[in-house]
Amino acid sequence: MTTTQAFSSIDKASGDTLSPISVPDRLLLGPGPSNSHPNVLKALALQPVGHLDPFYIQLMAEVQDLLRTAWQTKNRLTLPMSGTGSAAMEATIANIVEPEDTVLVGIKGYFGHRLADMASRYKANVKTIEKRWGEAFSLNELEIALKEIKPSVLALVHAETSTGVCQPMDGIGDLCRKYNCLLILDTVTSLGGVPLLIDEWKIDLAYSCSQKGLSCPPGLGPFTMNERAEEKLNNRQGKVPNWYLDVSLLNKYWGSDRVYHHTAPVNMNFGMREALRLLLEEGLEASWNRHRSNAEALWQGLENLGLKLHVDARFRLPTLTTVQIPEGVDGKAFSSHLLNNHGIEIGGGLGSLGGKVWRIGLMGYNSKMENVNKILEIFKTELSKFQS
Amino acid sequence: MTTTQAFSSIDKASGDTLSPISVPDRLLLGPGPSNSHPNVLKALALQPVGHLDPFYIQLMAEVQDLLRTAWQTKNRLTLPMSGTGSAAMEATIANIVEPEDTVLVGIKGYFGHRLADMASRYKANVKTIEKRWGEAFSLNELEIALKEIKPSVLALVHAETSTGVCQPMDGIGDLCRKYNCLLILDTVTSLGGVPLLIDEWKIDLAYSCSQKGLSCPPGLGPFTMNERAEEKLNNRQGKVPNWYLDVSLLNKYWGSDRVYHHTAPVNMNFGMREALRLLLEEGLEASWNRHRSNAEALWQGLENLGLKLHVDARFRLPTLTTVQIPEGVDGKAFSSHLLNNHGIEIGGGLGSLGGKVWRIGLMGYNSKMENVNKILEIFKTELSKFQS
């Protein structure tokens, strides 16, 4: 046997000249990711264990329990998908939508469009109702649509990250049961930061992300589905047309069988366990109230500076605030200034709000008065320099 | 406005009683994950930056360049999928398989079956050829199948983690061009640890993972496709039936446009950048030779103890060794003993090798003589206690 081999043609294009990683300090006050809790980062940096190690199996059960509490659900099928929030979004569609199913998507921002695109890839008969970006649906508008369209699935976004709107949920779950359809809810920008009661609101499937209200880096997509949704999955004609996100397979790994499906992102789940533990140590209500009071301070402060908020106070999302860029101000130049000279990230507008708003996030670990005061002070003293 | 709200029904089921995370020390000598390089773990624990931050955009380009070198490819479409290796596996299928395409899968272990299952979910006309678990395909066997079946895609596993076989690749790429089919190669257990030359071998699509030869925790799935594969993607009749893994969308984010697709797992990519940089700092050939010489020491040592290796020396994989469990030995009891009393993980057999072999991995950071000696010493002194 040869113990060394020579590969004369090996291309050394890169790598041997690159320095070790050095990351700039950023205060992330945009639409996400938010900064992570330092304890979560410490958990990420632990040496991995095997994905079938008894220790890890126990940790998986803890993550599931913590997630159930954070979402206020008893759903057995509650687990973090091994991908980002978008993977978890796709998992809700992939598992319960069959070809020709009518899926109604309530679109009031960027992420509604994404849901519609995804549903079409799973061959759904996609129907949409739309609201102006910055508004929410009324119960009446939804009932009219459900009555007329008779979908088997209604997909809505609870917290629209593109607009800063929080959809009031009172009565929507009951409507969906009345019209015999499943309700999918996007809780990417609400989980941990905004009141969210999956079971009480009769949400059938929901998904979220790790990097906003949970103060963990991006990389996991919390997912939950109840027994109504599971029944639809169990009665499918064919296999779920997505292997990686197939809950019937994932259930064998995350459920009691522990059958190997894919190698879990072990370290991200270490982080998720700590993130959820810290959230519940603070207390869900305490966290919701903290997000709300810090957001109110931000709103008041911005209005005191003469700035206009894009969303009516009734529908404003505590985790993400859309601020109208005043006429004559170069919004992009101001954001770049914040990033380059203060290390602070805020977001710009997406889609129809492009160039019209800034998006300021106060999420998870970053929802604190110190950050509110810092960003208000910069708006107060430096925004005028960007006025033409 | 209310600044505090009371939610009387909040369920406090878990969280407030859980202790901070504490992970047992493990030496991971199984089929993966392997232990991570300490510098990679440090990179994971850095505070995230935004996924559209100019710093991160630069880092993405670095990761892509490093990955191209590690894979020895100039493929533009080379990027880590935001999921584990199985997601990257699915990405190869999802992007280039259209309904009714004939996909030929060479099955010689567990992961061949997975490829066949995935291809069927994308409505391929799936054909398979099989070899006993522990063998490799000959060029002649592949040519006969290509000639007869005329597939548009051939999918093979380079390094079969379930059997410890390394498929010789000489001439297979040429055959696929002769018979006008695309070649998908699973390099999950070879990237970084075993000679692998994507362009020279004329591989059209390949995928891998982060947690083996790259010494990074699990969570990212390196993916690459060349222009031949891209042409098939561009000529699809319909959209890719998987939104999250759609390379035509991902290309706009990872390519020059930098259009937002999904929020990248920023910290995992910090880790991946360091993992790849460290691999190329050592040098690809040096790493391949290190894996080979440590594996040879393990093989020799096991044979000196009278143990039999499952795979013929010609096809043996340096990263993963299958050892036959001697008659009368309770293989599972010995593995549990290793884990519980020495903190060492080795794997058991999968599928048709269940109960018949142990799987010992020497991958990435863990491929060192110190580990070879440690595991051999325990086999030498303690295995006899598990003989009935």
Image (cartoon, coloured by chain):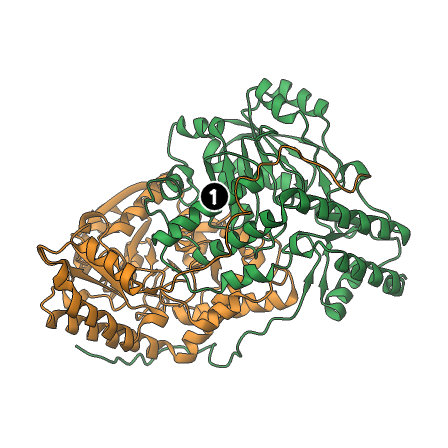
Chain colours: A green, B orange
Question: How far across and down, in percent of the image, does residue B194 sit?
Answer: 30, 69
Q: Mark 1 is on which residue type?
A: Gln
Nearer to us in this view, B41 or A102: B41
Q: Chain of mark 1?
A: A
| Disc 1 target residue | A64
Q: Quadrant of the C terminus of chain A?
A: bottom right
**Which residue: 64% across, 45% down?**
A189
Residue B243 visible from this viewpoint: no
Locate residue B288 relative to residue B312 in the image: left or right. Answer: right
B39 relative to A106, above or below:
below
Locate residue A138 relative to residue B361 in the image: left or right. Answer: right
Locate residue A187 relative to residue A52 in the image: left or right. Answer: right
Toward the front, the furthest residue is B17
B161 relative to A189, above or below:
below
Residue B2 visible from this viewpoint: yes
Question: How far across and down, in percent of the image, does residue A148 sit?
Answer: 64, 18
